[in-house]
C-alpha cells in the first residue's frame, strides 16, 4: 500500500512538472527568460558574407566568349546566348558577353548557396538584367582582387522581362552578397542599378552605380561594411522597403558617396554605426519612414548637402531621431521650407542629441527644436540675417578656444549645433555670416531667435510630408503621379491655419492664385484601394517618398503609402530554430505527462491484483 501511495505521488508530481514546462514555454519572455540564439543571428554579417577571398579550386570555370561561353565543369550551360547556372556550388566567370545574361536559376533538387567569382567580366544585356538571380538560397558575388568588372543593360526590356518585373542591371529575387576587393561598375539604363528582393549585403569592393532611377533598391534589408560605394541616381540613392513599408538599412563601415539623387538613403529603420557618408540630394538626405520609422546615428562622418532643393530635409524621420555619436554636417539652402533636421513632432516624435558633433544649417521657416531630454548640450540659433553660401560657422568657448569651425556650402539662417564640449552653464560665441552672437547655455537644450514655424508641417505648400513612403510613377519617367490620393490632406482639414499657430510673414491662409484643388477634393483622406495594397512585384509598389500629405504615421505621410498598416514585427515570428525548440519542450512535457499517467495506471492495476 505504501508503495502504491508513493507512485501516486510520483504521478501527480509528473503531471505538475509537465504543466509547469508548458506554462514556462508559453510565458518565458514575460517571466524574464531569454532565448539562446546562434552567433550568426547575433552578428550583422555571417562569415560567408565577409569572406571575399574564398578558394576557387574545384570551381566550374565559365569563360564568356562574346556571344556565348565555354564551360569547364558542372552546374551550368549555355542557351540562346545566356549562361544558365542551375546548381549550387562555386563558379569562376571571366570574359565578355555582348548581349546576354548570366542567369542563376536552381532547380528544387540542386538548390543551395552559389558562389560566383567575377574575374574580370564585361556583361551587357540589351533587354534584361546582365546578371539575373531567379532562384537560389543565397548568392555570393565576389570581386577578384585587381580586376575590373562591368554590368550594364539597355534602356528598354523585353516583354518577358517586364512581365517578370526584372528591373535592374544586377537583379536578384533572393539573398545577395557582394564582397571581395576588385571593382564593379554597374549601369542601369532601364531603371535601377542593383535590385534585391530579399536581403542585400555589401561587404567589400569598389562599386560604382549609375542608374536611371534607384542606385540600389532592396525589399527587406541592406547592410554595408568595408566597401567603397559611389552612386549617381535619377531617383533614390539607396532605398529599402517592402510592400508593407518595412525595411532596414544599416551602415557599419566603408564609404558611401551619392553624387546626385532625390532621396539619398531611405528605409523604415536607418542605423548608421560608422563609415563615411556624403550625399548630394534634392529631396531628403537620410529618411526614415514607413510602419515604425526610426533613425539612429551612432558614429561615422556624415555630410548632407542640397544646394538647389525646395522643401527638403537633411535628416528626416516620421518619428524619432537619435544621434549618439559621429560628425554630422548638414547644409540645405535658406530658400523655401528647407529643414536641416526634421522629425515627427506633430505625431509625438523628438530628436535626441546624446553625443557627436552636429552642425546643421538650413532655413528657419520650419525649424524644429531638439528634445530637452537630450544628454548633450545643443543650441538652435535663428540668425538676424541670411548668411551667404560659403560662409564660415565658428564656435568658441569663453577662453576663445575654437570648438569647431566649418564652411557651409549653402545659404542659411538657422543653425543647430552640438558638441561634447558644449555644456549647461557655459558661455560661447557663435560667428556666422559675418555676425557674432553670444550664447548662454541656461540648460542642455537652448534656443535663440524666432523660427518661422516651430514644428509645423513639412512638404509642399506647408502641408506635405517627405518623411512618409507613398506610391510612385511606374511609367519609367521618374515623375510623381498627380492624383488626388497623392495630395490628400489630413482628415477634416479645411484649409485654415490652426488658431494657436502663427503663420509665416505674408501668409494669409488662402490658397495662392492659380492653384486649384484636385478634382473631387472634399477635405477627406482618400481610402486606399486593394490594388494599392497589392504585392510589390505585382503592382510596382516600392515604398517611396510621398508626393504630399502630412508627415508621420497613420496615413499621413504623403499618399497611400502611410496607411494604418497592421504591424507585423519580427518579435511575433518564429524561426526554424524556435520551432525546433518548441517541439523539443512540448515533447518533453508530453513524455513526462505520459510517464506519470502510465505510472499511476500501473500502480492501480497492481493494487487491483492484490
Image (cartoon, rainbow, N blue to C red):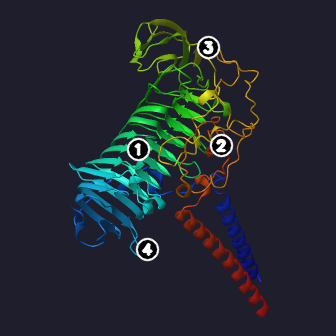
Of discs 3 and 2, which sits in the foreground? 2
Q: Which residue is mark 3?
A: 450
Comparing labels 4 and 1, the label whose residue is closer to the camera: 1
Classify 130 as above or below 350: below
Q: Please name which of the two marks, 3 or 1, marks the residue nearer to the observer.
A: 1
The 10 Å Cα crowd at callout 4, few under 14, some 14 to 19, many 20 or more, is few
As helix, strand or loop, the secondary structure at mark 3 comes to loop
Q: Quadrant of residue 89?
A: bottom left
Do the CB atoms of the residues marked 4 and 3 lie less than 8 Å apart?
no
Q: Could you tell me how far apart the alpha carbons at marks 2 and 1 are, in whole angstroms?
A: 26 Å
Which residue is disc 1 drawn over?
Answer: 212
Q: At numbered mark 2, what does the secondary structure look like: helix, strand or loop?
A: helix
| Mark pair 3, 2: CA separation | 35 Å
Is 533 on the left-hand or right-hand side of 475? right
- Residue 104 place in picture, x, y as percent: 36, 65
State yes or no: discs 2 and 1 in contact (Cβ < 8 Å).
Answer: no
Within 10 Å of the Cα at label 2, are there few (<14), some (14-19), or many (20+) other Cα atoms? many
Crowd class of label 1 (few under 14; some 14 to 19; many from 20; radius 10 Å): many
User: Which residue lies at the image location 75% right of the left edge and 21% below the top edge?
Assistant: 500
As drawn, the label of residue 485 is 2
Where is residue 460 shown, x and y percent of the image? 59, 30
Q: Is residue 156 left or right of residue 594?
A: left
The kind of secondary structure element at disc 1 is loop
Q: Nearer the viewer, residue 316 or 357?
A: 316
Sequence order check: which comes first, mark 4 or mark 1? 4
Q: Position of residue 324 (x, y in %)?
A: 50, 31
Q: Element at badge 4?
A: loop
Q: Read off the residue under disc 4.
A: 108
CA distance for labels 2 and 4: 43 Å
Towards the viewer: 572 or 233: 233
Query: Can residue 610 be seen?
Result: no
Residue 382 seen by the camera: yes
Amino acid at each position: 500500500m505504501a508503495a502504491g501511495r508513493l507512485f501516486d505521488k510520483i504521478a501527480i508530481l509528473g503531471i505538475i512538472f509537465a504543466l509547469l514546462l508548458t506554462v514556462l514555454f508559453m510565458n518565458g519572455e514575460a517571466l524574464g527568460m531569454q532565448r539562446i540564439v546562434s552567433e550568426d543571428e547575433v552578428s550583422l554579417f555571417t562569415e560567408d558574407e565577409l569572406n571575399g577571398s574564398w578558394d576557387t579550386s574545384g570551381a566550374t570555370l565559365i569563360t564568356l566568349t562574346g556571344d556565348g561561353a565555354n564551360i569547364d565543369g558542372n552546374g551550368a550551360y549555355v542557351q540562346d546566348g545566356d549562361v544558365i547556372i542551375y546548381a549550387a556550388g562555386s563558379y569562376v566567370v571571366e570574359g565578355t558577353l555582348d548581349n546576354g545574361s548570366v542567369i542563376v536559376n536552381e532547380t528544387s533538387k540542386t538548390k543551395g548557396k552559389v558562389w560566383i567569382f567575377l574575374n574580370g567580366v564585361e556583361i551587357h544585356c540589351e533587354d534584361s538584367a546582365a546578371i539575373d538571380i531567379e532562384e537560389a538560397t543565397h548568392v555570393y558575388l565576389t570581386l577578384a582582387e585587381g580586376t575590373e568588372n562591368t554590368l550594364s543593360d539597355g534602356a528598354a526590356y523585353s516583354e518577358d522581362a517586364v512581365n517578370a518585373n526584372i528591373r535592374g542591371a544586377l537583379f536578384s529575387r533572393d539573398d545577395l552578397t557582394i564582397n571581395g576587393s576588385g571593382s564593379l561598375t554597374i549601369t542601369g539604363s532601364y531603371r535601377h542599378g542593383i535590385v534585391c528582393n530579399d536581403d542585400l549585403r555589401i561587404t567589400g569592393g569598389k562599386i560604382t552605380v549609375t542608374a536611371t532611377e534607384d542606385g540600389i533598391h532592396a525589399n527587406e534589408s541592406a547592410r554595408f561594411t568595408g566597401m567603397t560605394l559611389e552612386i549617381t541616381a535619377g531617383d533614390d540613392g539607396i532605398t529599402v522597403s517592402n510592400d508593407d513599408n518595412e525595411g532596414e538599412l544599416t551602415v557599419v563601415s566603408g564609404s558611401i558617396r551619392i553624387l546626385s539623387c532625390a532621396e539619398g538613403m531611405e528605409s523604415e529603420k536607418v542605423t548608421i554605426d560608422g563609415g563615411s557618408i556624403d550625399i548630394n540630394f534634392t529631396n531628403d538626405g537620410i529618411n526614415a519612414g514607413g510602419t515604425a520609422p526610426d533613425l539612429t546615428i551612432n558614429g561615422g562622418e556624415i555630410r548632407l548637402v542640397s544646394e538647389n532643393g525646395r522643401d527638403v530635409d537633411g535628416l528626416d524621420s516620421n518619428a524619432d531621431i537619435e544621434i549618439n555619436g559621429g560628425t554630422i554636417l548638414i547644409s540645405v539652402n535658406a530658400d523655401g521650407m528647407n529643414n536641416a533636421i526634421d522629425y515627427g513632432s506633430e505625431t509625438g516624435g523628438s530628436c535626441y542629441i546624446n553625443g557627436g558633433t552636429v552642425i546643421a544649417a538650413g532655413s528657419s521657416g520650419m525649424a524644429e527644436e531638439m528634445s530637452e531630454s537630450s544628454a548633450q548640450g545643443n543650441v538652435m540659433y535663428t540668425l538676424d540675417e541670411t548668411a551667404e553660401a560659403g560662409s564660415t560657422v565658428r564656435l568658441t568657448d569663453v577662453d576663445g578656444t575654437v570648438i569647431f569651425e566649418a564652411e557651409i556650402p549653402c545659404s542659411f539662417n538657422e543653425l543647430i549645433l552640438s558638441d561634447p564640449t558644449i555644456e549647461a552653464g557655459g558661455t560661447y560665441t557663435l560667428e556666422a555670416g559675418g555676425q557674432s552672437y553670444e550664447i548662454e547655455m541656461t540648460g542642455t537644450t537652448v534656443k535663440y531667435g524666432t523660427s518661422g514655424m516651430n514644428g509645423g508641417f513639412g512638404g509642399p505648400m506647408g502641408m506635405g510630408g517627405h518623411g512618409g513612403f507613398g506610391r510612385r510613377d511606374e511609367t519609367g519617367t521618374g515623375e510623381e503621379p498627380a492624383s488626388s490620393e497623392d495630395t490628400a490632406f489630413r482628415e477634416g482639414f479645411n484649409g485654415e491655419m490652426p488658431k494657436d499657430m502663427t503663420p509665416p510673414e505674408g501668409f494669409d491662409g488662402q490658397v495662392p492664385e492659380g492653384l486649384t484643388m484636385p478634382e473631387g477634393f472634399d477635405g477627406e483622406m482618400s481610402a486606399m484601394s486593394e490594388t494599392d495594397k497589392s504585392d510589390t512585384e505585382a503592382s510596382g509598389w516600392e515604398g517611396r517618398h510621398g508626393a504630399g500629405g502630412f508627415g508621420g504615421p497613420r496615413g499621413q505621410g504623403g499618399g497611400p503609402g502611410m496607411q494604418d498598416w497592421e504591424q507585423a514585427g519580427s518579435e511575433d515570428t518564429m524561426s526554424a530554430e524556435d520551432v525546433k525548440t518548441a517541439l523539443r519542450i512540448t515533447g518533453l512535457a508530453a513524455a513526462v505527462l505520459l510517464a506519470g499517467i502510465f505510472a499511476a495506471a500501473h500502480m492501480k492495476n497492481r493494487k487491483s491484483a492484490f
